[in-house]
Image (cartoon, rainbow, N blue to C red):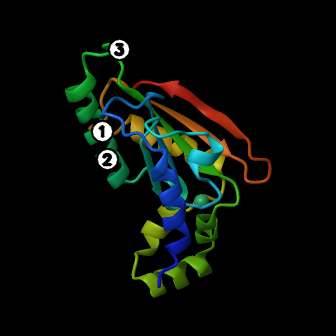
Amino acid sequence: MTRMNPLLERNEQFARTYTPEALGPPVAQLVAVTCLDHRVDPAIVLGLRLGDAPVIRNAGGRVTQAVIDDIAYLGFLAEQLFGDQGAADTLFEVAIVHHTQCGTGLLADPGFRHRAAEATGLPEAVLEASAVADPHTTVKADVERLLTAPSLSPKVSVSGHVYDIATGRLTTTVDARYP
Ligand SMILES: [Zn+2]
């Protein structure tokens, strides 16, 4: 018995009409970085379809070193596999999406953060760095962090957006730019 059972049935439905696609560049020429929150599923709120865009998700949609490492590898992979296709001077845009009502916002409170650190063993500084209290502020900071990462390909642009849980609307806070 597993809670996956109803989802396995949905997968069975999906597989019935599925047609596999060859490995190619993401159709949207985009990599999305979003919170892992189940209310912010980019496939739903951005209408992403299979093959449109790789998605990297973590608590808050924060640009951590792990995210920077993944994007560096995706840049290398895109250059190796598809570098001769399309505009030679661009690979893809990284769209960083933070959102309102983020559960990580609770970590801005020192008492909550202290209890979270004790319960999880994570350093308080790490938890504080992951907090999204004001998504407009944190998304700007994370666009800067990624743009100044030494491993970011000069052919990768970065943009910042805020998703409003109350309205379902995404607004652009930082327009796409190159390092
Ligand atoms: Zn969140």
The percent coordinates of residue 31 (x first, y second) are 44, 38
Which SS class for mark 3? loop
Residue, far right? 167
User: What's the residue at 27%, 24% (across, down)?
Assistant: 82
Which residue bears the numbered disc 3?
86
Q: Give yes or no for contact between labels 2 and 1 (Cβ–Cβ under 8 Å).
A: yes
Residue denoted by label 1: 74
Residue that lies at the very extreme toward the top in this rendered image: 87
On the image, the x and y values in percent for residue 142 come to 49, 45
- Gap between marks 3 and 2 measured at Cα: 22 Å
The amino acid at mark 1 is Leu
Q: Residues within 10 Å of mark 2 (few under 14, many from 20)?
A: few
Q: Is residue 4 above or below residue 164?
A: below
* Foreground label between 3 and 1: 3
| Secondary structure found at label 2 | helix
Name the quadrant of the C terminus: top left
Residue 98, percent from left and from top: 59, 49
x 59%, y 76%: residue: 110
Towards the viewer: 53 or 76: 53
Mark 2–mark 1 distance (CA, rounded to whole Å): 6 Å
Q: In the displayed orientation, state which residue is furthest to the left.
A: 80
Q: Residue at x 40, y 28 (%)?
A: 92
